[in-house]
Amino acid sequence: MIKRLVTSAVLGAAILGSQAGLAADFTLKFGHLANEENIWHQAAEKFKEEVEANSDGRIEVQLYPNEQLGAEMDVINSIQLGTADMTITGESLQNWAPKAAMMAVPYAFRDSAHLGQAVEGEIGEQIEAQITERANLVPLAWFERGPRHLTSNRPIEHPEDLDGIRLRVPNVPLFVDTWEALGARPTPMAFSEVFTSLQQNTIEAQENPLSLIESASFDEVQDYVNLTGHVRSWIYVVIGKDQLEGMPEDLQQVVRDAAQEMQAHEAELFAEDEQRLRQDLEERGMEFVEVDIDAFAEKARPAVLDALNEEQRELFEAIQDL
């Protein structure tokens, strides 16, 4: 009996020891601003699943949604300091890499296909290389963001239809200049004030992606979604360069392969969500209006080019030539 107990104790200790030996060699802290229901977080979960399975447990991915590691810039700074490892970020990267400004320039891209062609090609390589060189961050994957569209209480099909309309815009000088060039009267305003201002007719229109148009219930105070698609943008999933290169090459490849799986998964979710959003807003009574995008882009171009520096302007022109 005693011998049996001793044997059990030895076996138990051996099992515990083997479990301790299974602890991950590397831990990736992946923080971002989206909530658990957001497709970005669902994509991050796919990344975690792929990395942990294909590294045989040598890499553990810890996800921190809802700004648990801080706001976007906080997490970037933490990655650079080595206290976090990964995040999802967009045009904030232009604080280091001016070419990243292309991620939110009005009328840089004609449609989703044009955007993808740029990001997946030489232009994307230039932007990513500058981000890595100047911010010490390696873009692993990219996600398309929902295009920004104009909502209003009258249909807007041509630039002249904008004449004098009081339009809320974010406090971004390039956005203000672009809408002024198009003939509107842009008014920078906090997003939290937009619904009430539309309700009280202080402003007559606003512009945002379909996801925000839906979540803010703008259908209650706006009749039309004018498909201006004036800003088509994307964001990157980035990892610290030092963190990535601190892994053996086989594990670096596991991370890169998992990132491609994550990107493909998010792209599917994104396409489904854009379709769902349009259907939902139409069911709520909003009418979708096709606009003369070429006319809008042509009229906005001088203001856009004037706001860009020489390096950014060259990149913008290269995008137009694709």
Image (spheres, rainbow, N blue to C red):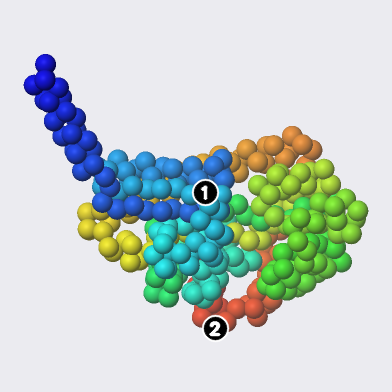
Residue under pointer 2? 310
* Badge 2 amino acid: Glu
Q: Position of residue 195 (x, y in %)?
A: 81, 51
**Quick one: label 2, few (<14), some, or many (20+) residues within 10 Å?**
few
User: What is the three-letter code of the residue carrying label 1?
Assistant: Pro
Q: Earlier in the sequence, mark 1 or mark 2?
A: 1
Asked if residue 319 shows in the view, the reply is no
Residue visible at 76% across and 55% down in the picture: 192
Q: Position of residue 20 (x, y in %)?
A: 23, 42
What is the x, y in percent for residue 307?
A: 64, 78
- Taking depth in this image into account, of 88 and 201 the one nearest to the observer is 88
The kind of secondary structure element at disc 1 is: loop
Q: Residue furthest bottom?
A: 310
Q: How many marks?
A: 2
Residue at point 81%, 62% (across, down): 167
Q: Which mark is residue 65?
A: 1
Marks 1 and 2 in Cβ contact (< 8 Å): no
